[in-house]
Every structure is written in structure tokens, then in C-alpha cells.
């Protein structure tokens, strides 16, 4: 899924463009947001901004795909190389939580709330979200098959996990006492305590920054 | 907090008015929703609808207050009469989850998403949400003081709980396999496993419908 059609000189800058645009759209609403608003916030000319984006009409869809691309690249893809399902779950929760905390969570909120897509765009975004959901649930099903999961419904558990993680995007703004790493760690701990049998958790591993063994 | 100024002949009907209005506002957007849309959906005349509501301008604020009134009446107030903090937490999670599942979760989504309030209205809603948050966190702090809580930050844990519960309002629409009671039970189980020490949970109690001992 390509999220932009032009060659992009700097991916960090593109990420900044999308995050800033998402913050403005959440504050002002999609309809009331102009390309000039976004250019001004970034200190760019409108012509400069068009180097990064395809225009207002495509912007919302492009931002959502960008968010889902990040989720693939930083969570789903590296997770697939982790053989042990408990370790895989731990990595997914911590890395997804860290991703949500970026840019005040604006992209995550946008992906879940804004409904101003065309039906065709909406089908694509819904399918991509569903794929991620299915991947996460399959990890829980694998743990269940190995007898490592508590007695919980894996569909309900997957939604609960996503609720805990996605909700982060809202409370970040409300409470500044915890760092991004603290938050990822706390979410992982609560979620893994809630889902895994005690003997399937290694409590020391919960306290370090979780990295995949191979990427 | 009064949510309507006129005498109301039937509270069930008022609840239906607010839930239907919330569903239409979520589908069409607040600005695009007219009083006629809501009256039509309810099979009422506009004059009949005005017996229940104060008008479009106040409607969003009234719906949010109605949602928070329900939360007080069905969750916070009965919870305050439960002496044991583990039982109180269990009741809060299950009864809040059941409340969210009503009317396709539209009121819950509205309270958390729609930002079209006046600054004065927004301050009132934010204060009410904060009061509920503080009450929930104080239950976790009490459990922590009694040594019954796992080693988690109570602020992060409170936000995680609210994320799990409020997210319900979204996935209800997506998955019809679980009943409202199943969902409340699963959420309670995952949350309590995640937060309480094993010897502070009574697993049988998790499987029955939780009711306060006195209301």
C-alpha cells in the first residue's frame, strides 16, 4: 500500500507532515482544515507541502495508511520473526504502545474516529485494521493452544488489548507524569498479567525494553 | 446535574430519545443532524420531541450529562456502598461494561469524541469525567494500600481499565458472537487478572453476575 505517489526526500519530514496534519484535523475538524493551515503549522509554503501530499481530498486516507504502514513496519513485521508466542505478544503490546504515544497520539485517534472517507477508501482501511486484529488474535489463539492463556475468550481479549493500547492516545494529553517507556511498560505488565498464566510470564523480561531477537 | 428542564413523563422514553439522537449524531455528524432527523427516527413529531429536549443547541451537552448521570446512578453510587475494595472494583468494571453496551455504545462514543461543546459546557463534562476517573483510581489506591494490587502504577491502570471498557462501544458493532453479559464477564476477568494478586481474586465470583450487596 503506497501512501504517497511522489518521491519523498525525507521520511522523517513526511512523518512530521502527517502527524501535524492529524493534530490540526483533530482540533479543527477535517472539513474546516485547509492545506494552508497545515503548511503554516509546518512553516512551509503550500507549494512545498504539495511535495509531500497529494491534496486535501486524499489527505485523510493517506494519513490513515501512513499510520497503518507504521504499525506494519514497527510492530507486525518484526513480531512475525519472534518464534515464542509469549515473547511475540509482549513485543507487540510494548511496541504498539510506544507507537501510539508518538505525536500526541493524533494519528491513532484519526484512524479510529474520523469517518470522512469514501466507501472505497473505508473498505481498504477497515480491511487493514481487520488484518492487524486477526494477527493479534492468532497470537492469543496460539497461546491458548499451548495452555499458556488464562481462560478468556480470545476475541474479547484482542479487543480489550486494542482498547487499552488505543486509549493511550487520549490520556497521554491528560497526564504527563509517566514517560513513553513507563507507559509502554505499564500497559504490557497489566495486559500480560491479565492474559497469561503466571508460569508463562517471566517477570524480569517485563521490566526491560522488549526488542525482537531478529528483525 | 439536571439534564432537562421540563417535566418528563417517562424516563425510559427519554433514554430512548437520547440514545437515538446519539446514534444519528455519530452517523451524520452533529452539524448535519436536524431535530427533524431525530423526531423521524423516533416516529415522533417535532413538537412531541420538544417535550423531551431543550433544542439542538443544548442537545449534545444534555446527552453527555445523561450518559454521566447513568454512570453515577448505575455504577458509582451503588459501588460506594460496597465495603470490600476487590468486590467494589469487580462491580464497577462489570456494571460499567454493561452500561457501555447499551444502545450500540453511541452515548459512550459521543461523550469521548465529540468536541462541539461551548467552553463552559466542556469544563463541566471534563470535570465530571475526571471525578469518575478519580473515584476509580481511589479504589485501586485502596487495593494497593492493602497489598492486593499487582505492582502497577494506579494512574496507568485506571486509564487502561477505562480504555478496555470504553473501547467496547466500538467493537460491539463489529462482533455479535458474545452477549452483553458475556462481554461484561470477559472484561471483568481480564481486568481483574491483570490488576489483582491471585489470592485477592475469587474466581467463582468472576463467573456470576456481580451485584452490589446493598444499593
Image (cartoon, coloured by chain):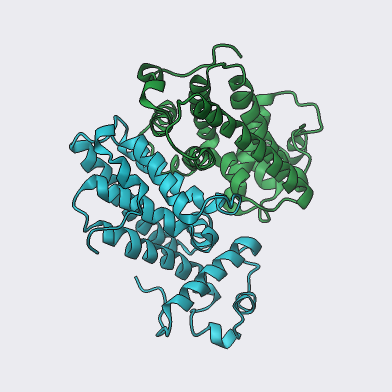
Chain colours: A green, B cyan
In the image, taking residue A211 as reference, residue B27 lies left or right, namely right
Any part of residue A43 in sight: no
In the image, taking residue A22 as reference, residue A9 lies left or right, namely right
Which sits in the foreground, B91 or A54? B91
User: x%, y% of residue A168?
Assistant: 47, 39
When asked about the image quadrant of residue B37, the answer is bottom right
Tally the marks. 0
User: x%, y% of residue B144?
Assistant: 23, 37
Q: Is residue A172 above or below residue B179?
A: above
Q: Is residue B163 above or below residue B81?
A: above
Any part of residue B110 in sight: yes
Which residue shows up at 48% across the image and 24% down it? A90
User: x%, y% of residue A8?
Assistant: 76, 26
Residue lying furthest bottom in this view?
A: B47
In the image, taking residue B44 as reference, residue A39 lies left or right, namely right
Which residue shows up at 33% across the image and 39% down it? B155
Which quadrant holds the C terminus of chain A?
top right
In the image, taking residue A150 as reference, residue B28 lies left or right, namely right
Which residue shows up at 42% across the image and 68% down it? B66
Which sits in the foreground, A144 or A35? A144
User: x%, y% of residue A150?
Assistant: 42, 33
Which quadrant holds the N terminus of chain A?
top right
Amino acid at each position: 500500500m503506497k501512501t504517497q505517489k511522489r518521491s519523498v526526500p525525507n521520511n522523517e519530514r513526511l512523518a512530521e507532515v502527517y502527524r501535524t496534519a492529524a493534530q490540526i484535523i483533530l482540533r479543527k475538524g477535517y472539513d474546516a482544515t485547509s492545506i494552508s493551515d497545515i503548511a503554516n503549522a509546518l512553516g512551509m509554503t503550500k507549494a512545498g507541502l504539495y511535495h509531500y501530499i497529494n491534496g486535501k481530498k486524499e489527505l485523510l486516507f493517506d494519513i490513515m495508511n501512513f499510520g497503518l504502514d507504521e504499525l506494519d513496519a514497527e510492530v507486525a513485521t518484526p513480531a512475525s520473526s519472534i518464534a515464542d508466542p509469549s515473547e511475540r505478544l509482549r513485543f507487540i503490546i510494548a511496541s504498539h504502545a510506544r507507537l501510539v504515544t508518538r505525536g500526541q497520539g493524533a494519528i491513532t485517534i484519526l484512524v479510529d474516529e474520523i469517518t470522512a472517507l469514501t466507501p472505497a477508501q473505508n473498505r481498504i482501511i477497515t480491511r487493514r485494521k481487520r488484518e492487524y486484529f486477526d494477527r493479534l488474535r492468532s497470537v492469543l489463539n496460539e497461546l491458548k493452544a499451548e495452555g499458556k492463556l488464562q481462560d478468556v475468550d480470545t476475541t474479547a481479549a484482542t479487543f480489550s488489548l486494542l482498547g487499552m493500547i488505543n486509549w493511550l492516545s487520549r490520556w497521554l494529553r491528560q497526564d504527563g507524569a509517566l514517560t513513553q517507556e513507563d507507559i509502554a511498560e505499564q500497559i504490557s505488565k497489566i495486559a500480560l498479567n491479565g492474559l497469561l498464566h503466571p508460569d508463562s510470564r517471566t517477570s524480569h523480561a517485563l521490566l526491560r525494553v522488549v526488542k525482537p531477537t531478529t528483525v
